[in-house]
Image (cartoon, rainbow, N blue to C red):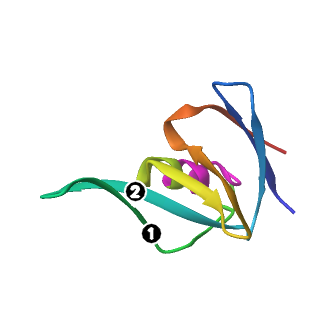
């Protein structure tokens, strides 16, 4: 199974694998101020040549924060990812 290790600016790391479900969280502004909204779940997929990199890049570019769908007690900041390493 394809896997990737995300490293964050605070030193934390997160391992993701193909088929894993992620819940993106995006912020928006309305007349009441800044709000957040959970977006539809995103499944990590594997490209035949490039592995998980395109999928993870797509996820990180499409949301401000995210959490693991099956473990929602920790939210990750998409812009805090400094490296993505696949293995």
Kindly report the secondary structure that dominates the magenta region of the rendered protein.
helix
Q: Which residue is mark 2?
A: 26
Q: Quadrant of the C terminus?
A: top right
Q: What's the magenta region?
A: 50-58
Q: Nearer the viewer, residue 29 or 86?
A: 29
Name the spot of residue 58 as percent of width and height, x first: 50, 54
Confirm whether the magenta stretch covers residue 57: yes
Image height of 30 relative to 19, above or below: above
* In-front residue for pair 62/76: 76
Q: Please tell me which residue lies in front, 76 or 79.
A: 76
Q: Is residue 55 magenta?
A: yes
Q: Residue at x 62, y 57 (%)?
A: 67
Q: With 76 as the anchor, is 34 left or right in this view?
A: left
Task: Answer with left or right where residue 77 lies relative to residue 68.
Answer: left
- In the image, taking residue 71 as reference, residue 47 lies left or right, namely left
Q: Earlier in the sequence, mark 1 or mark 2?
A: 2
- The residue lying toward the viewer, choosing from 39 and 20, is 39
Q: Which residue is mark 1?
A: 39
Q: Are marks 1 and 2 in contact (CB under 8 Å)?
A: yes
């Amino acid at each position: 199974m394809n896997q990737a290790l995300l490293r964050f600016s605070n030193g934390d790391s997160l391992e993701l694998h193909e088929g894993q479900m992620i819940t993106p969280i995006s912020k928006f502004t309305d007349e009441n101020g800044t709000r957040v909204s959970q977006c539809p779940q995103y499944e990590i997929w594997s490209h035949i040549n490039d592995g998980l990199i395109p999928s993870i890049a797509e996820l990180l570019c499409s949301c401000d924060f995210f959490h693991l769908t099956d473990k929602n007690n920790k939210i990750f900041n998409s812009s805090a990812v400094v490296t993505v390493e696949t293995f």
